[in-house]
Image (tube, grey):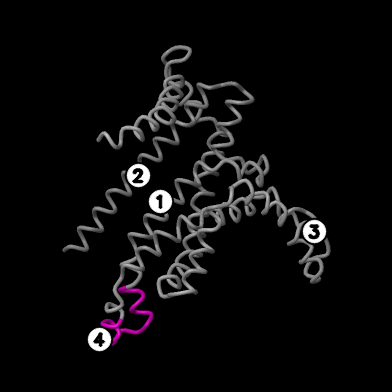
Amino acid sequence: MALAAPFLVLAFVTFLLPLGSLLHESLFLPTPTLAHYERAVTAPVYLRVMLRTLRIAAIVTVLALLLAWPLALVMARSTGLKLAILVASVLLPLWTSVLVRTYAWMVLLQKNGVINQMLMASGLVDEPLKLLYTETAVVIAMSHVLLPFMVLPIYSALRGIPDDYSRAAQMLGASEWATFREVIFPLSLPGVTSGCLMVFLLALGFFVTPALIGGPQQMMIATLVSQQVREMLDWSFAGALVGVMLAFVLLLALIFKRAVRLDRFVGSA
């Protein structure tokens, strides 16, 4: 416990204390009230922002999963230099600032950016497409930034599956598709669920990428909280928004915990 004390103190000072202060303001300033929470969950404009945040987070999670699973499978079946190159390709974005990666996407997606220039040069379009400041741009950029958080858990799960399982299934007459469906994918589910939860939760609180690449119509909850604090100076309502999203995240974590327990129970039955 003593070894963990510095971390616990740091977590309390930098996370729990500010969060508790913000939630206290949302409930007790100027007087004890739930009006800020009622406003957060009933006003149509704020409901749209929350639903948009959930929708974008869900789309990013699905897209990251579709991109990450095949890549993780190739990594799990690779060795030597090929594996080193793949791992470096996944980890390299984590060593680059999110702000730098976001500006890179802005260069690619802007009206006179690389993608529009390529499309016009190939004759596919006659005029530049509006790619920047759209929900599609936000989803693509967020998926790129969060992809490593999906790849690594799935790769770890696939790496732990013995090759004997696939060979045994094929010796018993299973096709490659049946082996994947009945053996490989079910055994990778712990990594899939961990990666999905991590990406979804990170996407819910994403700030830099949606703020720079998305327009006012793509505002997400983190941008809304920042707007309430920096422009409206309404700390109490900002705390209510944080409280609503915190309650949702805790509920999701509890559901995930129950699902993992159920998966272990079924696996041991």
Label 4 vs label 1: CA separation?
A: 35 Å
Q: Which residue is mark 1?
A: 197
Q: Which residue is mark 2?
A: 253
Please, what is the three-letter code of the amino acid marked with disc 2? Ala
The span picked out in magenta is 167-183
N-terminal-most mark, 3 or 1: 3
**Residue 204 inside the magenta-drawn segment:** no
Secondary-structure class at tag 4: loop
Residue 174 position in % (x across, y down) = 31, 84
Quadrant where the N terminus sits is top left
Label 4 vs label 2: CA separation?
A: 39 Å
Please, what is the three-letter code of the amino acid marked with disc 4? Leu
Q: Residue at x 66, y 47 (%)?
A: 213
N-terminal-most mark, 3 or 4: 3
Q: Which residue is mark 4?
A: 172
Residue 85 vs residue 234, the one in the foreground? 85
**Badge 3, how many Cα within 10 Å: few under 14, some, many 20+?**
some
Quadrant where the C terminus sits is bottom left
Secondary-structure class at tag 1: helix
N-terminal-most mark, 4 or 2: 4
Q: Which residue is mark 3?
A: 128
**Residue 172 inside the magenta-drawn segment:** yes
Q: Is residue 47 left or right of residue 123?
A: left
Label 3 vs label 4: CA separation?
A: 56 Å
Label 2 vs label 3: CA separation?
A: 43 Å
